[in-house]
């Protein structure tokens, strides 16, 4: 069933953002950190088994959550665990897995914002108003993140990665999770799902998408998508619920 577009999905190499109306969802677990802001009202958010009403919130990577946006237009972003935005904002959580934040009205994008430049500038302005200089990421961890993002291997070869940065496999696994909040294998799954979104085209089959993104097979892809979004990309994109803007390539 086709819908009039309810919003826009903006894709960058290290994060993606959405502006528009979202469907309610059941518990799911993004591997990335969540930025959730109501542009014209409050919404309900469940984290760690507790519901609350808020106008803006952060959720740490790999934490189960559920959203009831109601009629509120949402500004949502999924920030890669190594993203500069997330590293500038994570101090708000302190030792918790989620926190409410106060986003100045002057930093909010317009509900009808449709340009990559406009939405990226809004995020940069909001992070500058709320954040600190990004927490330093160990250069060995950053090298691994960049390598996985560039190569997108079928699976994580921890020993090979550890050798490339002069660490033992156990030390790399510990350091990576300590700095990003997610295990290496979960991080790779997140990158694969980003590849699915980046390569989505009308008419492209699920099996082809799964293969191109490095999933073992279509069922593995479907399970991962359900776990991360409580939905398949087709339920938002192919139906026309969202338009897609690939900001790293074709969009201004």
Image (tube, rainbow, N blue to C red):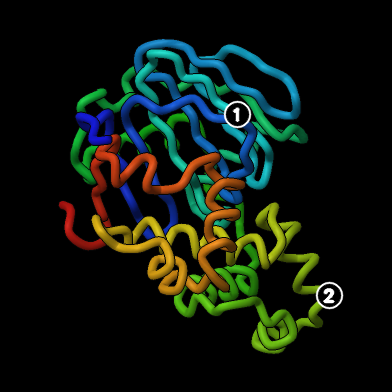
> Who's the residue at 75% across and 73% down the image?
172
Residue 8 — which label?
none
Q: Nearer the viewer, residue 31 or 99?
A: 31
Q: Quadrant of the N terminus?
A: top left
Q: CB of mark 2 within 8 Å of CB of mark 1?
A: no
> Who's the residue at 28% across and 38% down the image?
242
> Who's the residue at 65% across and 66% down the image?
138
> Is residue 123 visible from the viewing direction of this image?
yes
23 left or right, relative to 31 = left
Q: Nearer the viewer, residue 192 or 90?
A: 192
Q: Secondary structure at mark 1?
A: strand
Q: Nearer the viewer, residue 103 or 202?
A: 202
41 left or right, relative to 64 = left
Residue sitting farthest toward the front = 1
Q: Report how many numbered discs are placed on residues in the image.
A: 2
Q: Residue 12's image quarter?
A: bottom left
> Is residue 120 visible from the viewing direction of this image?
no
Task: Tell me: residue 20, above or below residue 238.
Answer: above
Q: Which residue is mark 2?
A: 170
> Who's the residue at 38% across and 29% down the image?
75
Q: Residues within 10 Å of mark 1 (few under 14, many from 20)?
A: many
Foreground tag (2 vs 1): 1
Q: Residues within 10 Å of mark 2 (few under 14, many from 20)?
A: few
Q: Earlier in the sequence, mark 2 or mark 1?
A: 1
Residue 50, percent across and down? Answer: 73, 20
Residue 109, percent across and down? Answer: 28, 27
Q: Which residue is mark 1?
A: 66
Q: Secondary structure at mark 2?
A: helix
Residue 84, percent across and down? Answer: 49, 52
């Amino acid at each position: 069933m086709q819908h009039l577009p309810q919003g826009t999905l903006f894709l960058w190499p290290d994060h993606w953002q959405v502006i528009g109306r979202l469907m309610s969802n059941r518990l799911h677990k993004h591997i990335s950190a969540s930025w959730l802001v109501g542009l014209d009202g409050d919404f309900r958010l469940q984290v760690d088994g507790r519901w609350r009403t808020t106008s803006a919130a952060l959720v740490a990577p790999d934490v189960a959550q559920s959203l009831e946006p109601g009629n509120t237009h949402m500004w949502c972003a999924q920030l890669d665990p190594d993203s500069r935005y997330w590293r500038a904002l994570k101090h708000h959580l302190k030792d918790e897995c989620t926190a409410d934040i106060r986003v100045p009205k002057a930093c909010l994008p317009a509900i009808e914002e449709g340009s990559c430049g406009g939405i990226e500038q809004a995020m940069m302005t909001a992070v500058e108003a709320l954040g600190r200089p990004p927490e330093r990421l160990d250069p060995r961890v950053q090298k691994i993140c960049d390598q996985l993002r560039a190569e997108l291997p079928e699976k994580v070869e921890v020993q090979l990665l550890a050798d490339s940065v002069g660490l033992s496999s156990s030390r790399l696994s510990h350091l990576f999770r300590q700095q990003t909040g997610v295990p290496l294998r979960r991080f790779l799954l997140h990158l694969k799902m980003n590849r699915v979104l980046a390569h989505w085209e009308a008419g492209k089959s699920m099996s082809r998408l799964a293969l191109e993104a490095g999933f073992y097979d279509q069922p593995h892809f479907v399970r991962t998508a359900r776990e991360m979004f409580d939905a398949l990309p087709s339920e938002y994109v192919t139906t026309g619920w969202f338009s897609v803007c690939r900001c790293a390539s074709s969009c201004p």
